[in-house]
Amino acid sequence: MNSPRKTALVAGGFYLVTFISIPTLALYGAVHSADYVVGPGPDTGVLWGGLLEVIVALAGIGTAVALFPVVKRQNEGVALGFVAARVLEAAIIFVGVVSLLSVVTLRQDPAGADAASLVTTGKALVAIHDGTFLLGQGLIPGVNALLLGYLMYRSRLVPRIIPALGLIGAPLLLASVTATFFGVYAQVSVWSGLATIPIAAWELSLGLWLVLKGLKPSPITAGTTAAGTPPAYRDITV
């Protein structure tokens, strides 16, 4: 198996792994209750949701690291920006997960705090997670789609219809995040859900294509071998 095929399998696999985050909204449903931090019941849903988000964050970094050696030959600056955006996305997600784990800790060990203080602190921590969710899994994926979509579209490593989905969906997602940020509609709403569909289609189709078909022959993969380093190409116009 040659190096481009390995790269495609790894990157595509990581992209598909990121879809395990779909159940998190349902798993986090209870934590948005006003009295969650002082109420009864298990914390299993929140803990599972946090674990899924951590996996998604790491898989996101994996997609960028796996693709970087190839796409940097199209445009190294944009490719490096994609890696940086993925790392930033993961960092934001980690902050959100820590905030929810803090809610669980307060719930299990209130340390003598009164109920009113616990509720206030719990709401603040949940609000932090909601903010990181908006940025880390709303804003940054739009930026990622612009960066990687450009690289894939120019290089023709996959059929152009696939990165076109990302390039079309990115402005829609960024506009939706902006509207949510300014209170035009709720973070979880029909409009925000519709805005995520093109980006979801872009990431899913990219992951499936990379796993099933691999990278298409391109000048930036010419001469790549499993044992050696391919020649460098930069900012190639295809």
Image (cartoon, rainbow, N blue to C red):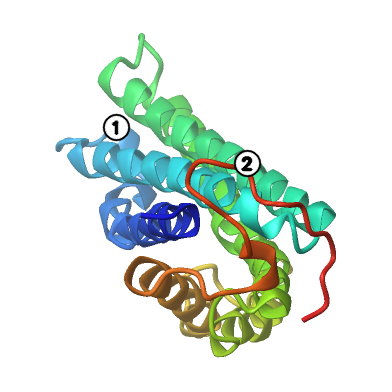
Whether residue 183 is visible: no
Q: Considering the image in quadrants, where does the N terminus appear?
A: bottom left
Q: Position of 134 compared to 23: left or right?
A: right
Measuring from the top left, give residue 130's x and y in whole percent. 53, 51
For marks 1 and 2 on the same chain, the one whose residue lies earlier in the sequence: 1
Judged left or right of residue 192, residue 44 is: left
Q: Residue at x 33, y 63 (%)?
A: 22
Mark 1 closeness class: few <14, some 14–19, many ≥20 residues within 10 Å: some
The image quadrant that residue 24 belongs to is bottom left
x, y percent for residue 89 = 61, 47
The secondary element bearing badge 1 is classed as helix
- Residue 197 lies, with reference to residue 122, above or below; the image says below
How many callouts does the rendering have?
2
Quickly name the residue at label 1: 38
- Residue nearer the viewer, 6 or 177: 6
Is residue 139 visible to the viewer in this orientation of the structure?
A: yes
Q: Which residue corresponds to the image point at 50% horizontal and 30% vertical from the top-left?
A: 121
Instruction: Residue under label 2, please give it.
Output: 87
Q: Position of residue 138 (x, y in %)?
A: 59, 63
Question: Mark 1 and mark 2: span between their CA atoms?
Answer: 35 Å
Examine the rendered structure and indicate whether residue 57 appears above or below residue 116.
below
Query: Which residue type does callout 2 highlight?
Result: Val
Q: Tag 2's secondary structure?
A: helix
The quarter in which the C terminus is drawn is bottom right
Q: Nearer the viewer, mark 1 or mark 2?
A: 2
At 63% from the left and 43% from the top, the residue drawn is 229
> Is 3 situated above or below 117?
below
Disc number placed over residue 57 in the picture, else none:
none
Q: Nearer the viewer, residue 67 or 5?
A: 5
Residue lying at the far bottom in this picture: please name it: 161
Q: Residue at x 74, y 69 (%)?
A: 182
